[in-house]
Image (cartoon, rainbow, N blue to C red):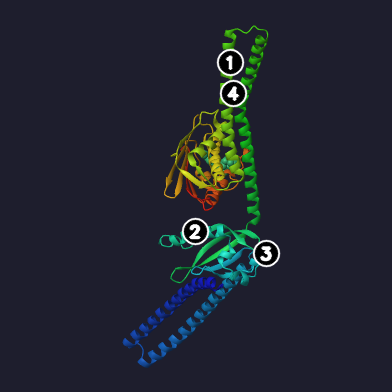
Amino acid sequence: MKKLVEATYLKMNLNLLQKKYLAVTARTVIPVVLIVALLLSAIHLHLLPVSGGIIGAAGLLCLYLIWQGAILEKSRSNTEKALQESAAQYKLLAENSSDVIWTMDLATLRYLYISPSIRHSRGYTPEEAMNISLDKAVTPDSLSRALQVLQEELEKEKDASADPERSRTQDVELYCKDGSTMWAEIRVRFLRDTAGKAVALLGASRNITDRKRAEEQLVQYEKMAALGSLVAGVAHEISTPLGVSITASSFLHDSTKMYAALLEQNELKKSDLEKYMKIAFEAADIIQSNLNRAANLIHSFKQVAVDQSTDEARRFEVKNYLEEILLSLKPKYKRTPHQIHVNCPEEVELCSCPGAFSQIVTNLVMNSLIHGFKDVPQGNIYFDIYRDNTDLLLKYRDDGVGMAPATLKRMYDPFFTTNRQHGGTGLGMHIVYNLVTQKLKGRIQCSSKPGAGVEFQLRIPLKAALCPG
Ligand SMILES: Nc1ncnc2c1ncn2[C@@H]1O[C@H](COP(=O)(O)OP(=O)(O)OP(=O)(O)O)[C@@H](O)[C@H]1O
Ligand SMILES: [Mg+2]
C-alpha cells in the first residue's frame, strides 16, 4: 500500500500546516488583546462611555475576526491544494517510473506496495508480486546478502547519531514470472512512523541485467586470459630444465657412441672407461634432477590450472598451495629484485575453492608487481596468514608506491584502472572482491596511502558450505 509513503508525506505537510495555523493564531490573538486593552484604558480614563466602548470593541473585533478568518481560509485552501498536488506528483512518479518502486513491512518482510512497472521487468502484476514471499522473489544468494545488509542497518538504528535519511544500494537477483532471473540495483531506505521508528522499507529497483551479463562474460574472458598466461608461464618455466636435460642426454649419447667405438676397435683403456663412467654418472645426475624439477613444476601448474577451470571446493594446506601458486608466478618476478615473504603455519587448512584462492593471490601479486613496484628498485610482498576461530586471516602487504585516496575508493569498480595505456582492464580487483565475498563468502578490506604501500586484510571461513566431508 502506498498509504504508508503517502502518510509520511502527509505528516511532513501537516507539520507545515500546523506551523501556518500557529502563525495565524498569533496574528489574531495579539491584535485582539491590544484592541481590548486600548478600549478598556479609554473607558477607564473616561474618554469613552462604557456602552459605547463595549459596542465599538465588539464591532472592531468582529471586523478583525472576519478579516483574519478570510486569510486563514485562503491559507488553508492553498496548503490543501499544495498537498494534493504533491500527492499527485508522488503518484505520477511511482506509477510512471520505469524503476519499480515498492514498500515493504519491516515486521513481516512482505510487500505493502509495488508500482505497476513490475509488469515490464518481471512479468507479474503488482497484485501477484505482492503475494509472493521474499524467499520466492529473490535468489538464495541475493536474499542472504540482502538480509545481512538489513541486519547491519537495523544495528545502526541503535546509534542515535545515524542519519535517519540514509539509504543503501545493492545488486540483487530476482525471479521473473517465466522462471528466468533478472538483476536489479535496488536503493532502499527506511520509512518511519511519527515517533521516528523505522517501520517499513521504501525501495527503487532498476533493471541492470544487461550490465551484469556483460560483466559476467568479461569475467569469463578474464579467467580464460589468466589461464592462457598461466600456460605461457608453464611453457617458459619448464623449457629450462627440459633444455638442460636434452643437452645432458645428447652429450651422454655422443660420449657413449665414442667409447663404444673404442671398445669395438679394442682400444678402450681402463682410464677411458673410468672417464666414461664419470661422464655417464654426471649426465644421469643432471638429467634426473632437471626432470624432477620439470615434473614438480608440471604438478603445481596442473593443480593451479585445473582448479582455475573447475574450481570445486576441496581441502588444501594453505602454505603448500600458496607456494605452488607463487612458483607458477615466478616467471613474472624472478628476473626482478622483488621478493615475496610467506609467514603461515604449516598445518593451516582451508576447505574451500582453491581456484578462487589462487586467482585472488595471483591478482594481488600481479598488481603489486605492475602498479606497486612501478619505478621501485626493490619491493617486498608479505603474506601473513593465521587461523582465527573459524576463519582464515590473510594479511597481504606490499611496500610499493601505494594508492591515492581516489584510486583506493574506486579500486574494486569494474573497469577502473590507472593502467589502461598498458593494457590494464580494471577487472582484476573487481574479480578479487567478487571471489572473496561471493565464492569464498569472506570479507576484504584495503588500506593504502601514497608512498606507504598497500595492505589487504582478507577474512575467509575455513570451511565453505559446499566443502565435501
Ligand atoms: N598493490 C597496488 N599498488 C598500487 N596500486 C594498486 C595496487 N593494486 C591495485 N592498484 C590500483 O588499483 C587499480 C585497479 O586494479 P585492478 O587489478 O582492478 O586493475 P588493473 O591492474 O589496472 O588491470 P587488470 O584488470 O589487468 O588487473 C589499478 O589500476 C591500480 O591503480
Ligand atoms: Mg590488476
**Amino acid, disc 1:** Ile
SS at badge 3:
loop
Displayed-image quarter of ligand 2 = top right
Closer to us: mark 3 or mark 4? 4
Q: Which mark is residue 178?
A: 3
Provide the residue designation for mark 1: 279
Whether residue 117 is visible, yes or no, is no
Of pointers 1 and 4, the one earlier in the residue sequence: 1
**Amino acid, disc 3:** Asp
Task: Specify whether tag 4 is near ligand 1 (CB below 8 Å).
Answer: no
Q: CA distance from mark 1 to mark 4?
A: 12 Å
Q: Which mark is residue 148?
A: 2
SS at badge 4:
helix
Task: Specify whether tag 2 is near ligand 1 (CB below 8 Å).
Answer: no
Of pointers 2 and 3, the one earlier in the residue sequence: 2
Q: CA distance from mark 1 to mark 3?
A: 75 Å
